[in-house]
Amino acid sequence: VAPAAPPPAEIDLLSDILGGSPAPAPPPQAMGGAPPAAPPPGMGGGMDSMLMDLLGSSSPAPAPPPAQGGMDAMTAMMGGPAMGLGAPAPAPGSFAPFTAFNKNGLVVSFACTKDAANPSVTAIEASFTSSVPAPISGLNFQVAVPKYMKLQMSPASGTTVPPSGSGKVTQLFKVANSMHGQKPVLLRIKIDFGVNGQNFSETGQVDSFPAGI
């Protein structure tokens, strides 16, 4: 009967090491399981308490969600939220205007806009200005396209261009390129106009469209 005395001493020694009384271990809610039944003295209670101390559960704090932490780290690596995968891509839009014709005081510039629903369609606004101190009268602008393209023109806003760049006349037309990506947009133009009582009839080709047209 005398050898049965050591277990209480071992329990007291284990309690001193763990800094508390041999009370049942607190339910490990932080580990996500249901509270277990109270273990027998000297076995389950002491071992569970020691294991929880080793795992740092004396002051349990919920760990940050792994998905959120991973997203934050990825966002930091990518340089911030602006570079995330959810950033919308820029929609097709306008291109920088360019000069299509410049002769005898008449300057014609083209401003192109892509159709967002159909990249083979390009809307072109032609702007007519005068680089001389005299107005330009009798303006008549015509366009021809190759067989692989289609053309739709709207009437011009006027036939007289104010002098010295003080105003402009505009005309909108659309071209559809059935060989988009294979053949470029190509136009043949004919312009009739008069300056200082002198009439001109000019023809030419426009093939210097911006990349992507």
Image (cartoon, helix red, strand yellow):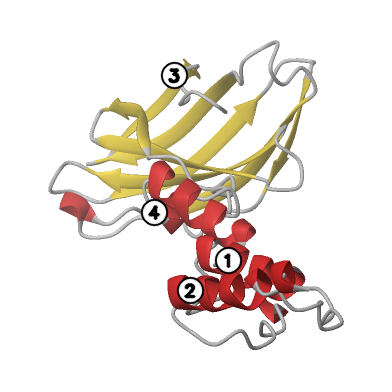
Residue for point 76% across, 17% down: 179
Q: Nearer the viewer, mark 3 or mark 1?
A: 1
Identify residue type, mark 2. Leu
Rounded to the nearest angstrom, the CA distance separating label 1 from label 2 is 7 Å
Residue 159 seen: no
Circles 3 and 1 in contact, beta carbons < 8 Å: no
Q: Which residue is mark 3?
A: 208
Residue 122 picture location, percent across and down: 64, 38
Residue 130 picture location, percent across and down: 25, 45
**Looking at the image, is mark 2 or mark 3 earlier in the sequence?**
2
| 120 displayed left or right of 122 | right
Q: Nearer the viewer, residue 141 or 3?
A: 3
Q: Which residue is mark 4?
A: 80
Residue 150 picture location, percent across and down: 77, 30
Label annotation for residue 18: 2
Q: Nearer the viewer, mark 2 or mark 3?
A: 2
Identify residue type, mark 1. Met
Rounded to the nearest angstrom, the CA distance separating label 2 from label 4 is 46 Å
**Looking at the image, is mark 1 or mark 2 earlier in the sequence?**
2
Q: Which residue is mark 1?
A: 50
Rounded to the nearest angstrom, the CA distance separating label 4 from label 3 is 39 Å
Identify residue type, mark 4. Gly
**Looking at the image, is mark 3 or mark 1 earlier in the sequence?**
1
**Would you place residue 47 above or below residue 93 in this image?**
below
Q: Nearer the viewer, residue 193 or 35?
A: 35
Rounded to the nearest angstrom, the CA distance separating label 2 from label 3 is 84 Å
Rounded to the nearest angstrom, the CA distance separating label 4 from label 1 is 43 Å
Circles 1 and 2 in contact, beta carbons < 8 Å: yes
